[in-house]
Amino acid sequence: MLKFNKIYFILFFVIFLIEILIAKYATGFLRHTIGDYLAVMFVYTFIKSIFKISTEKAVLITFAISFIIEFLQLSNLQNHFPKEYSQILKLILGTSFSIGDLIAYTLGVITIYLIEKYFKKIKTSS
């Protein structure tokens, strides 16, 4: 069900800004690992900002999207399109498969789930 959520949208926008800063200025661990860790949070907050779905469904969708994108890097898909499309595909898909990215995505969705459960617990005990 479509339903705009202002809080998740604000979080989405803040994470988007952080991701831009990381992409522009960071290198090494911060760019590759923390960037991927935050990427799943970026996708999750986008999903939750426009869809009224359970935390579990949103986490599973986010997890699936992140893993599908990472495994698509094995296909070399971005190099099978004209140059004007390959650049945007490289931005979306990345350029190389990494187990480290899968670990960062997994830790990211676990973090999301734990944070959501914590805030749900606080909300229900109030």
Image (spheres, rainbow, N blue to C red):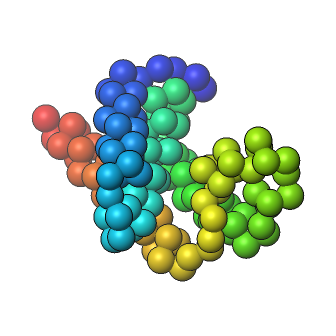
Q: Nearer the viewer, residue 91 or 67?
A: 91
- In the image, taking residue 6 as reference, residue 99 lies left or right, namely right
Seen in the picture, residue 68 relative to 56 is either above or below; the reply is below
- Residue sitting at x 47%, y 64%: 105
Seen in the picture, residue 85 relative to 39 is either above or below; the reply is above
- Residue sitting at x 47%, y 20%: 4
Q: Nearer the viewer, residue 8 or 52?
A: 8
Residue 16 horizontal/vertical position (percent): 40, 38
- Residue sitting at x 72%, y 64%: 72
Which residue appears farthest toward the left when viewing the image? Answer: 126
- In the image, taking residue 42 as reference, residue 15 lies left or right, namely left
Residue 114 horizontal/vertical position (percent): 31, 58
Q: Quadrant of the N terminus?
A: top right
- Residue sitting at x 69%, y 66%: 73
Q: Quadrant of the C terminus?
A: top left
- In the image, taking residue 122 as reference, residue 46 lies left or right, namely right
- In the image, taking residue 32 as reference, residue 96 lies left or right, namely right
Residue 102 horizontal/vertical position (percent): 52, 71
**Number of numbered discs overlaid on the protein picture:** 0
Q: Nearer the viewer, residue 21 or 47?
A: 21
Which residue appears farthest toward the front when viewing the image? Answer: 83
* Residue 4 visible in image: yes
Residue 25 horizontal/vertical position (percent): 32, 52
Seen in the picture, residue 32 relative to 123 is either above or below; the reply is below
Residue 2 falls in image quadrant: top right
* Residue 64 visible in image: no
